[in-house]
Amino acid sequence: MSRPSERGVALVAALGALTVLSAIATSLATTARLERGLARHAVAAAQADALLRSGVAAAAVVLGETAADGAPDTLAARWAADAGRQRLGAGWVEVRIEDEARRIDLGSAALAPALARLAAARGLDPAVADAIADWVDADDVPRPRGAERDAYGRGPGCGPRNAPFASLDEVARVRGIDAAALARLAPFVTTAGEHVVNPNTASPEVLAAVLGDAVAARVVAARTRAPLDAAAIDALVGDLPPGTRALLAPRGQRYRVSVTAQVGDETRAVEATLWAPPGADPEVVAWRPLVTPP
C-alpha cells in the first residue's frame, strides 16, 4: 500500500503533466487559429487582387465600346459616369476613369509653351517648363532657363532622366519644383504620353494655357451647347496658328483608370493607364499600385 507522501508526489507529477499537456494544447489551438487567420487574409487578398483586375478589365470594355462609335469624348460619355462602389462577391470594387487629354502632357515639346503659361497662372516661375523639358529630352544641352545634368548633384538618381517621366511624383525632382509646386500643377498635367488636349473635357485652366483666355472662354461656352467634333473645333479656333489647332482633338488615346477593391480587411488600389485609340482594343500600358491607408 502506497504511503501518503508517495501518493502526493504522484499527484503533483500528474498535475504537472496535465499542465504541460494543457499548455501544448493551448499552443496548438493558438497556432491553428493563427493559421486559419492567415489563410483567411491570404484568400481575401487574392480576392481583392482579382476584383482590382476585374475593375481595370471592365474599364477597358467600356472604353473599347465608346471608342468604336467615333463620337467626341465628353464628360457625359459612358466611361465618365461615376458608378460608385459596387458590391461583387465577398467584397466591393470602385472604378473611376479619366481621359488624360484633359491635361497638359509634360513630355510634349509642342505643349511646353502652354505649360509655361499654366505654371505662371498657378503662381509658379514659368521657367519650370524649360527645366521639365530638359528633364525628359535625350540631350544634355540646357534650354535658356532650363537645367541639365550640371545643375544637379552627381550621386545615384540625381540629374535628369533624359526620358519620359516614370510617374507624376518624379516631377518633384526637377529643379524649381518641390512638393508644394507639384501639388499646384498636378490636377492639370499628366505624364501618360497623351500629346493632344480635348477641348470637350479639359478644364478652363488648361484651355486658357493652350488657347488664351478669350478663345478658351469661347470653347467652354460652345461645349455646353453640344459636343465639339473636329469641324466645331476648327470653327472655334480658326483664327489661331495651325500649330495650336494641331494640339486639339475631340478625343484622346490614353485614359487614367483608378480602381480600389476591398475584401474583408484587405484593400488594394491601382492606377492604370490604358491606351484606347479608335479602332483598336484597349491595352494596359502602365500599372501603378497605390498605397492604401491601414
Image (cartoon, rainbow, N blue to C red):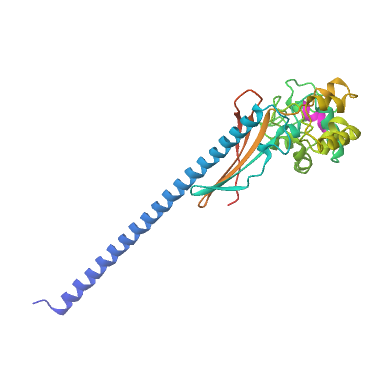
Q: Which residue is rendered at x = 62% and y = 30% of the image?
A: 65
Q: Is residue 11 above or below residue 139?
A: below
Query: In which quadrant of the rendered view does residue 176 lie?
Result: top right
Query: In which quadrant of the rendered view does residue 274 lie?
Result: top right
Q: Nearer the viewer, residue 268 or 165?
A: 268
The secondary structure that dominates the magenta segment is: helix
Q: Which residue is rendered at x = 83% and y = 34% of the image?
A: 207
Q: Is residue 113 left or right of residue 257?
A: right
**Residue 116 at what x, y percent from top left?**
84, 32
**Is residue 94 visible in this depiction of the protein?**
yes
Q: Residue furthest bottom?
A: 4
Q: Nearer the viewer, residue 181 or 59?
A: 59
- The quadrant of the picture occupied by the N terminus is bottom left
**Residue 93 at what x, y percent from top left?**
57, 45
Q: Is residue 211 left or right of residue 61?
A: right
Q: Is residue 205 magenta?
A: no
**Is residue 126 visible in this depiction of the protein?**
no
Q: Residue furthest left?
A: 1
Q: Is residue 182 above or below residue 263?
A: above
Query: In which quadrant of the rendered view does residue 73 lie?
Result: top right
**Residue 277 at what x, y percent from top left?**
66, 25
> Magenta segment range?
128-133
| Label total for image | 0
**Residue 148 at what x, y percent from top left?**
77, 26
Q: Is residue 22 above or below residue 140?
A: below
Q: Is residue 129 magenta?
A: yes
